Image: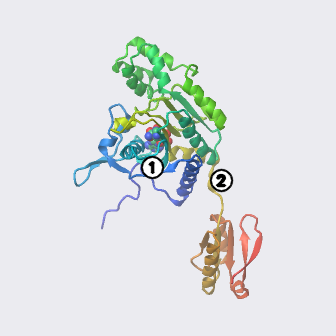
Amino acid sequence: MAEKLSFEAPRGMRDFYPEDMVWRNKVFDAFRAAGEAAGFEPYDACVVESYELLARKAGEEVGEQIYHFNDKSERHLALRAEMTPTLARMVAQRQKELPFPLKWTTIAQCFRYERMTKGRKREHYQWNVDIIGEESILAEVEVIGAAVDALRRMGLTTRDFKVHVSSRKFLGELLAKSGIAAEKHAQVFLALDKRGKMPDSEIAAMLKDGGLSDADVEATFKIMDLKSYAGCAELEDLFRLAEIAGFADALQFDISVIRGLSYYTGVVFECFDTAGEFRAIFGGGRYDNLLTTIGGEPATAVGLGFGDVVVTELLKARLGADAVRAKKGVAVGFMFPEQRDAALKLAAKLRADGEAVDLSLKAQKPKKFFSHADQSAAAKAVFLGPDDVEKGVARLKDMATREEQEICLT
Ligand code: HAM
């Protein structure tokens, strides 16, 4: 006898049963609607990339989490862990022809060999919203505004989430004022990004490994206690513009937001639930050097990645199942095989009128049909018995109000 295979998906990979798809669709619909409402154009690419494009300098977690393999021609390939390098490659390939600034969006499946914790899987979908070729802070405002809009479309409010904002440029200036040389900043950012995830003593050790003296480490930790962005013109502008755009209440300055990716150069932000129960909902920032890093012409850029995993957990916790229980469409059933043709004909007629119709595949007793229809997604139901077909008239029942309306079968 053949050995029985495990029916489980590989660890960290996700199956989407119909009851999971209703949540995924709700989230994706909000992503797409918010992207469209803010004028972002969809793009896409294959999940397989050359490993070389994704391979990164040491110190970055994502670099170590890449799934990679050699194909039969010994090409070193990888599954993308994020969309940003692919976006940079696509832009660099057509940099002379593209009409900048670009506003592009996609929902990208990404793979990371992560330690499995709440909100972190080895496969996730990540909505990306990026503006390439615009240096003004309005680009940050538009990108963050689109993400806030998506959360609102899902039914959440600024009581549920906050976008924590900082600036690497600002933090860099503060570090420089404390006498920490610019070439050490990248290391400092990577170490500080680990705050809250490991003890400060270990972070201090990482900073010292990066060439900081004891006094520098102390100065660095002091900077991290800063509560205001006074003196940072770009953040002042960002908060003022967000006020005009109507989402300033979603923002909060937070110097501890650093971001774990080394390509960020300016404003950085990360969205969290206000109760602090979940991992980051989305994160992003300005990355002005990525195009040149991969060999393209210089181009300024700002964008974000918004995963489906954490936000779905948050929606389930805050809104419950009602958020996806909207009923729509018509269930059509019939009592005996003799009414099957009439039921199919009615289903075809309703579908031609634009209704979504769930046609029963077998004859059923009315009680069974209506109890099934009650539990299904159908908003209305119609059941055909011998009399209905003979008279050519049936009753369309509203499942919520129980009201009936006569409909013609011919
Ligand atoms: P990131 O912070 O690595 O940024 O990921 C962005 C978001 O993707 C996270 O906030 C989270 O929602 C989701 N995410 C990441 N890893 C996982 C995982 N293992 N399981 C579930 N969800 C996850 C980036 O990837 C940047 N490329 C974003 C960006 C776009 N920056 C500029 N443009």
Percent across and percent down for residue 11 are 39, 49
Q: Closer to the camera, 99 or 174?
A: 99
Q: Is residue 376 left or right of residue 281?
A: right
- Asked whether residue 279 appears in the rendered view, the answer is no
Residue type, label 2: Asp
Residue that appears at 62% across and 35% down: 250
Instruction: Please name the residue that numbered disc 1 is placed on.
Output: 108
The crowd level at tag 2 (other Cα within 10 Å; few <14, some 14-19, many 20+) is few
Determine whether the beta carbon of the residue marked 1 sits less than 8 angstroms from the nearest atom of ligand 1: no
Give the residue drawn at x 71%, y 83%. Answer: 388
* Disc 1 residue type (three-letter): Ala
Disc on the earlier residue, 1 or 2: 1
Q: What is the CA distance from the residue labelled 1 to the residue labelled 2?
A: 27 Å
Q: Position of residue 96 (x, y in %)?
A: 39, 44
Task: State the image coordinates of residue 204 (x, y, percent, origin top left).
Answer: 41, 19
Which residue is situated farthest in the left direction here?
A: 73
Residue 350, visible in the rendered structure? yes
- Mark carried by residue 322: 2
* Residues marked 1 and 2 touching at CB (< 8 Å): no
The image quadrant of residue 337 is: bottom right
Between circles 1 and 2, the one closer to the viewer is 1
- Estimate the x, y position of residue 290 in percent, counting from the top left: 39, 36
Dot 1 lies on which element? strand
- Residue at the (38%, 51%) spot, across then down: 47
Q: What element carries label 2?
A: helix
